[in-house]
Image (cartoon, grey):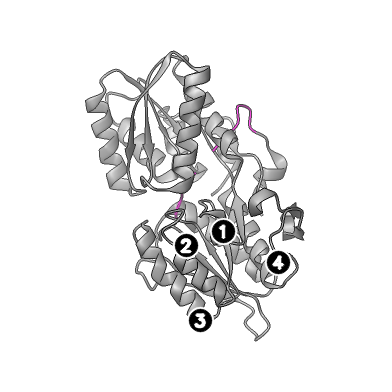
Amino acid sequence: MTHNLRRTTTIAAMALVAGLGLTACGSDDSSSSSGGGGGDATSVTFLPKNLGNPYFDTSDAGGEKAVDEFGGTFEEVGPDTATPDAQVPFINTAAQQGVNALVISANDPTAICDALDEASSAGTKIVTFDSDTDAECRDLYISQADAEGIAKAQVDLIAEQIGDEGEIAILSAAANATNQNEWIDLMEADLEENHPDIELVDTVYGDDDDQTSFDKTAALLQSHPDLKGIVSPTTVGIAAAARYISTSEYKVEVAVTGLGTPNQMREYVKDGTVTAFALWNPEDLGYLAAYAAKALADGDIDGAEGDTFEAGDLGEYTVGADGVVLLGEPFVFDESNIDDFDF
């Protein structure tokens, strides 16, 4: 794998995206498949929050790599928009097709549970990754990093970049995104407890859409003329915010950080718009999710705490409480290391 962040790096202040994307497969029925195909092959379908998101392009590519390694069949499907209702038809179709495992990043913790329950009843193993559902709605959740660590990393980054004082705002993804809201709650608590001179003046939602996030950035700067920093815990948002600020009067004056991918953020680090940001390796996240799905589908594990399974190049993992498997620590990217990564 390209740069196993889990094994080779640790975060200084603790950190990261995302949600990222690729170029899109485009329409609701878009999909790709690969892998071994015989009747005994483990079939795995990846359902990201939406297609056309660089974060999920990368994570799903990691899943496809894993499925190829263990000789299964891989398919990626998904909606164009990151809404829970848009994911339901794809869940239903996967169940009807009898896929062995569905790997999904949830757009809502509860709204898709009925569909997931039906799929589970039909024999499909349910693995969430990146963004979880309620625990009773899936078999395993593959978490990119500890939520407290992700939140603290982003707060530490913005605090350092603005001298630990001033007004900041958060540019999130969708208002009901499980992971985003958990991180924001933890960031608010960290700010209140440890950074009394930093004031969070606004939280806005770009819906993981580039243009919407770009426009929200402009609106934030107009509404809060004393703003010193923007934290965006989503790869789409941080790139859009950096793009806006890079050609504006706010460059250098307003810090931008959060969760992003090196390839998205490289030009903004090089031109001085962004000092540092965080993320885990989304390719590894998808790779681990696919191996977890295989272990479930093959009956090697049932998702109980203490279960262990092998995840190819990443080695052995252990299932934690509530069916959570932790990929590892996130990583901080800056000018000194960003050229070492390509995703």
Residue 136 is labelled as 1
- Which percent across, then down, holds residue 59? 54, 56
State which tag comes first along the sequence, 3 or 4.
3
Q: Is residue 84 left or right of residue 338?
A: left
Give the alpha-carbon distance from disc 4 to disc 1, as whole Å. Answer: 19 Å
Task: Report the residue at 33% width, 41% height from top.
Answer: 205
Foreground: 280 or 44? 44
| Residue 97, numbered label | 3
**Which residue type does callout 3 highlight?**
Gln
Q: Disc 4 on helix, strand or loop?
A: helix
Range shown magenta: 11-21
- The residue labelled by disc 2 is 113
Mark 1 neighbour class, 10 Å CA radius: few under 14, some 14 to 19, many 20 or more: few
- For label 2, the crowd category at 10 Å Cα-Cα, with few meaning under 14, some 14 to 19 and many 20 or more, is many
Tell me the number on the disc at residue 280: none
Q: Which numbered mark, 4 or 1, is in the foreground of this view?
A: 1
